[in-house]
């Protein structure tokens, strides 16, 4: 991992995008498997806590690993990081289709809703993965302010804290105590962090 004070430059080569996408796809598959197996072993509050932790951790990886690999400093770097996120979702789709579906780890409710086809929601997954990486890279690029310093860990940590706070607020005020609410909290935290980073860097 690059030192916090070591100069870095944007990396937008094929090896970074494809290789990083493969790593992200495999990490996503591992997270899905762990989520599924633990969901079978747990119930009640413990299940929600563990699922929410996996969703938060996985979401932060999906959002900031592309930025860590690409090191975006401008709009082009942000776009390349978003592409890496998309490539990661494509790798996961292949792993999911070839390995996880035959193992029957979880129910394919969305297939049933779509009349037996998953191609009505799989592209949404691809777009979501690209959007997470885009937001994470945007935050990193804004906070870097054009500098050549690796600033990925701190933005990820701040986003995680914001997500936890929003998760708590949502479950108290509006939504049920559920891992899906953590996913919503993370998405809102990313958007909020973009706005906060933009305001703070202009001061």
Image (cartoon, rainbow, N blue to C red):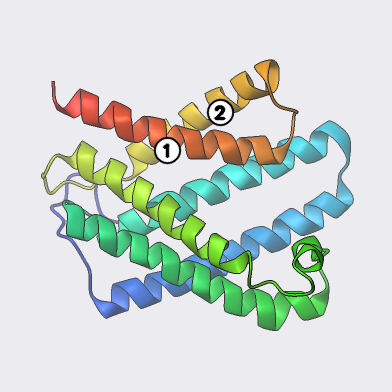
Residue name at image x 63 percent, y 64 percent? 121
- The reply to whether the C-beta atoms of the residues labelled 2 and 1 are less than 8 Å apart is no
In the displayed structure, 163 sits above or below 4; it is: above
x, y percentage for residue 140? 27, 44
Residue 106 against residue 154 in the figure, above or below: below
Q: Residues within 10 Å of mark 1 (few under 14, many from 20)?
A: many
| Image spot of residue 57 (x, y percent) | 56, 46
At horizontal 42% and vertical 38% (from top left) the residue drawn is 190
Which SS class for mark 1? Answer: helix
Query: Is disc 2 surrounded by few (<14), some (14 to 19) or many (20+) residues within 10 Å?
Result: some
Q: Position of residue 85 (x, y in %)?
A: 42, 63
Which circle, 2 or 1, is nearer the viewer?
A: 1
Residue 71 visible in the picture: no
Residue placed most toward the observer, 125 or 32: 125
Look at mark 1 in the image and give the residue it sits on.
190
Residue 11 image offset from top left, x and y in percent? 21, 66
- Name the quadrant containing residue 194: top left
- Is residue 22 in view? yes
Q: Disc 2 versus disc 1: distance between alpha carbons?
A: 12 Å
Label ID, residue 97 = none
Helix, strand or loop status at disc 2: helix
Quadrant of image for the C terminus: top left
In the picture as drawn, the residue positioned furthest to the front comes out as: 115
At 56% from the left and 28% from the top, the residue drawn is: 164
Q: Mark 2 points at which residue?
A: 164
Left or right position of 144 against 174: left
* Quadrant containing the N terminus in the rendered view: bottom left
The answer to which of marks 2 and 1 sits earlier in the sequence is 2
Q: Which residue is drawn at 81% across and 35% down?
A: 46
């Amino acid at each position: 991992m690059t030192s916090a004070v070591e100069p870095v430059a944007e990396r937008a080569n094929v090896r970074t995008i494809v290789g990083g996408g493969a790593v992200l796809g495999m990490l996503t598959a591992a997270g899905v498997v762990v989520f599924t197996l633990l969901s079978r072993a747990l119930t009640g509050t413990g299940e929600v806590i563990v699922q929410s932790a996996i969703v938060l951790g996985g979401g932060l990886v999906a959002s900031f690993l592309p930025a860590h690999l690409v090191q975006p400093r401008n709009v082009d770097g942000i776009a390349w990081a978003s592409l890496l996120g998309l490539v990661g979702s494509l790798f996961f789709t292949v792993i999911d289709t070839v390995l996880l579906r035959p193992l029957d780890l979880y129910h394919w409710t969305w297939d049933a809703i779509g009349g037996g086809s998953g191609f009505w929601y799989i592209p949404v997954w691809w777009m979501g993965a690209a959007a997470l990486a885009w937001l994470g890279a945007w935050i990193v690029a804004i906070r870097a302010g054009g500098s050549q310093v690796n600033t990925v860990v701190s933005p990820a940590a701040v986003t995680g804290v914001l997500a936890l706070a929003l998760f708590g607020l949502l479950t108290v005020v509006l939504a049920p105590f559920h891992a899906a609410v953590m996913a919503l909290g993370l998405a809102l935290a990313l958007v909020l962090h973009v706005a906060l980073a933009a305001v703070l860097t202009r001061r």
